[in-house]
Amino acid sequence: MPKRLTLAVAQAHTQPTTSATLSDLSDKAHEATSKGVHLLLFPEAYLGGYPRTCNFGAAVGSRSEEGREQYLQYFHNAVDLGDTPRGAGDDWTAKRLEVAKGKEYRGDGTREELEAVARETGVFLVVGVVERAGGSLYCSVVYVCPKEGCLGKRRKVMPTGSERLIWAQGSPSTLKAIGTSIQGIELTLAAAICWENYMPLLRYSLYSQNVNVYLAPTADARDTWLPLMRTIACESRAYVMSANQCVRRRNLPPWIRGTSVKEEAIGQPKDEDTPEKAADGTHSPSNQVNMPETPQPLAVDKALGIPTPSPLRISSDSQATSPVKERTNRRRSSNLLPIPDNHFLALPAGSAVEDVKSEHNSDWKASPPHSEDEFISRGGSCIIGPAGEVLAGPLWEVEDG
């Protein structure tokens, strides 16, 4: 008689505190036990939190104090699993690293708590965590066996895009599959975290270890994710499990929603750029653009035959004038409307430019209000069979699926 194994993914989102998230994880593991689940996957950065919508006050060449404070809160919400910044590998797994005098374990006890939950529930846990080691954060995945405790851990090799601002690079040496037996079935597990799944050679490094359960915790909620998971299943001939957080704006952790981080302060220059003083000795806004009172003509690019904005000359009375004399029947008048990044829109004369100005304020500080019910991440968790067939999901806009 063939043996059966029940796999599940938890589309859960990070709670306001790390301790609350650990409690939520325990609840979901106990619920999984009641449903006969043997292996349960949690999303990327479930413990510690995925900092969606954050920029931590960073712009090229500057950091805001509010952004530094926000990162400090994020750093403290990360978990310490007792590993070294370099990554101790098998020595960490086997608990051969030195423990400080008077301490029962390395780290903050998160590893021990995960092992206790797995042991109590009998569920094999695979959990995405933001791991704190030394002065750096790593996006990691930990494999927790109900009988043997942590069997391994790996760190994201290359954080994606702006994630590189906050997460350090993990070692490729952690791209190791984990062998285990569940319900008498021999399994070879391996995880690729989010964008790593778009890297063919990284995928191959896992395929080459004869993986039969491929794990893909992610933060990618785009429609393109499901086809990727189906492709990986076809390539590897493995079962593919993917878990993503589904979260509304109102449920973002407080260090993301905190009032101490002001939208208008984030990304503003601190020391590198000093606003010029106006004639009366006051500082003018650094991005302020003075609109000419009279429409400016468009010159004609002779090579291309297309209208282009003519150069402006500012006179002593601050009135903009054009050095090009007006040509009848060969040119159009326009209004120049400033938009972000020092660009302009040339609008025909007579257009409702004042209405457009009101919508596109030149200081660009105002932003449209956000709905608290807005989905910051829509989820999309799924399970795919070895032939690429969708066995479950994708689960959209369900916060606790």
Image (tube, grey):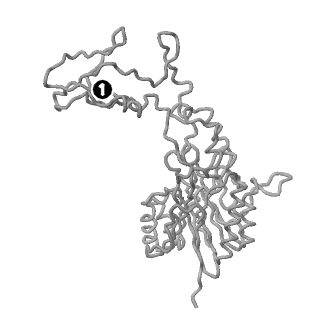
- Check the image and name the residue furthest to the left: 329
Q: Nearer the viewer, residue 373 or 6?
A: 373
Q: Is residue 111 left or right of residue 308?
A: right
10 Å crowding of disc 1: few (<14), some (14-19), many (20+): many
Rendered position, 250 above or below 31: above
Residue type at mark 1 is: Asn
- Check the image and name the residue furthest to the right: 102
Q: On the rendered image, what quadrant is the C terminus found in?
A: bottom right
Q: On the rendered image, what quadrant is the N terminus found in?
A: bottom right
Number of callouts:
1
- Check the image and name the residue furthest to the top: 316
Residue at left 64%, top 49%?
253
- Where is residue 191 shown, x and y percent of the image? 56, 64
Residue at left 48%, top 23%?
286
Q: Is residue 90 left or right of residue 355?
A: right
Q: Is residue 7 left or right of residue 298?
A: right
- Where is residue 284 shown, x and y percent of the image? 49, 19
Q: Nearer the viewer, residue 274 or 249?
A: 249
- Where is residue 287 shown, x and y percent of the image? 45, 25
Q: Secondary structure at mark 1?
A: strand
**Label 1 sits on residue:** 335
- Where is residue 305 shown, x and y percent of the image? 16, 31
Residue at left 42%, top 60%?
224
Rendered position, 198 above or below 347: below
Instruction: Specify the quadrant of the image occupied by residue 104.
Output: bottom right
Rendered position, 168 above or below 216: above
Residue at left 60%, top 63%?
400
